[in-house]
Amino acid sequence: MTHNPTNPILRLHNVHYEVSSAASSLAILKGCELEVEPQQSLAIVGRSGSGKSTLLALMAGLDTATRGDVQLLSHNLSQLNEDQRAQVRAQSVGFVFQNFQLMSGLTALENVMMPLELFNLDQPKQRAEAALESVGLSHRLHHRPQSLSGGEQQRVAIARALVTQPKILFADEPTGNLDETTANQVQDLLFQLQDHTTLILVTHDVDYAARCQRQVRLEHGQLIEDTVCR
């Protein structure tokens, strides 16, 4: 299944993913095909356990396909080692997780500064402060995650994901652990801050998925539907 963009930011070709044990092999993804245009918003939907998070991890270079090609920003991820994939992620990729994945011993400011410092990027403190201000948390810079609400923790995670100005942002059930009101606020924020960034999200929320420009459905290990929402 392809969308025929002129210069896709992401392309999957015949992507398979299998988990093997001594006794058997379980096929989770079976020949996925997909192309995503720059600055597009795309929702990946499907039942729980269908492999959506696995697919997202392959797209972002957090894992590698058993076979097939994942091309991200002109890099064939299957041909890169982990250090090289990490460099691609550092330069161009943001990731927001359902469970926030903040460092409990660091303040909000330090959590957002971390990717900047990790890759020796300029002005980490100033850029992190600006990112936290953009998500409405300039008054919570020096609070640690345990003293923040779930919605505030997710906003810190969004600021951390966007502080490097990534070309593509992956979000794995980013509102799954939030109440409805807070989830709506986080959804609004993600679309508001997406700006010039490609957004690819996994969600069970039908209304959230419908806010994206495009939806694909993962079923029986394959991407079977491609719907243009707007």
Image (cartoon, rainbow, N blue to C red):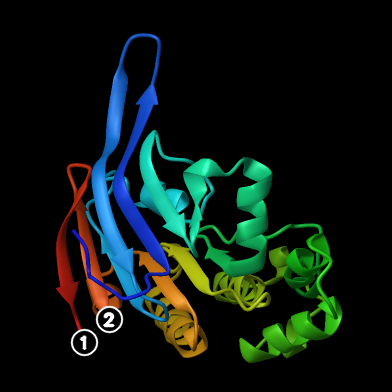
Q: In front: 76, or 173? A: 76
Residue identifier under label 1? 230
Closer to the N terminus: mark 2 or mark 1? 2
Q: Where is the C terminus found, in terms of image quarters?
A: bottom left
Q: Which residue is depicted at the point 47% across and 41% down? A: 64
Point out which mark residue 213 bears: 2
User: In the visual, does 183 lie left or right of 94?
Assistant: left
Q: Residue 42 appears at what percent x and percent y?
A: 32, 72
Q: Residue 63 appears at what percent x and percent y?
A: 50, 43
- Could you tell me which secondary element the residue under label 2 belongs to? loop
Q: Amino acid at mark 2?
A: Gln
Q: In front: 35, or 118? A: 35
Q: In front: 115, or 143? A: 115
Q: Which residue is depicted at the point 69% across and 90% down? A: 133
User: In the visual, does 149 lie left or right of 117?
Assistant: left
Q: Amino acid at mark 1?
A: Arg
